[in-house]
Image (spheres, helix red, strand yellow):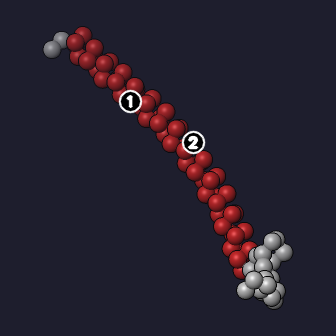
Amino acid sequence: MSKVDLRCEMQDRISELESRVAFQEEMIDQLNDVVAKQDKVLMDLSRVVTMLNHKVNLGGQGEGGIEANEPPPPHY
């Protein structure tokens, strides 16, 4: 194999590797965006769960819930 052929082969291999790295960088950026969105969703859901937990522990009083001391409706 001549030096020119070897040099062309090396250039082709380098170009292929550069292409793969560019693709991987783009994929990493896309995955990072997905993870950031999922993190926001998880934080929002965590706040909702905390709020609901608080409401359950208070018995839902003051926001349309039935007070524990309130007598049952007349149809019971």
Give the CA separation, mark 2 to mark 1. Answer: 20 Å
Image quarter of the N terminus:
top left
Give the SS element for disc 1.
Answer: helix
Residue lying at 61% horizontally and 57% vertically, measured from the top left: 42
Residue lying at 78% horizontally and 75% vertically, measured from the top left: 65
Residue at which label 1 appears: 20
Residue lying at 53% horizontally and 38% vertically, measured from the top left: 29
Mark closer to the chain start, 2 or 1: 1
Residue 33 higher or lower than 49, as above or below: above
**Side of 54 relative to 21 (left or right):** right
| Mark whose residue sits in front, 2 or 1 | 2
Circle number at residue 33:
2
Location of residue 18 (image quadrant) = top left
Query: Is residue 58 in view?
Result: no
Residue 28 higher or lower than 40, as above or below: above
Image quarter of the C terminus:
bottom right
In the image as oriented, which residue stretches furthest toward the left?
Answer: 1
Give the SS element for disc 2.
Answer: helix
In the image as oriented, which residue stretches furthest toward the right?
Answer: 62
Which amino acid lies under the numbered mark 2 shown in the image of this protein? Asp
In the rendering, at what x and y percent does residue 11 appear?
Answer: 32, 18
Q: Nearer the viewer, residue 44 or 69?
A: 69
Residue 39 higher or lower than 17, as above or below: below
Q: Nearer the viewer, residue 61 or 30?
A: 61
Location of residue 8 (image quadrant) = top left
Which amino acid lies under the numbered mark 1 shown in the image of this protein? Arg
Q: Are marks 2 and 1 in contact (CB under 8 Å)?
A: no
Residue lying at 43% horizontally and 35% vertically, measured from the top left: 24
**Side of 17 relative to 5 (left or right):** right
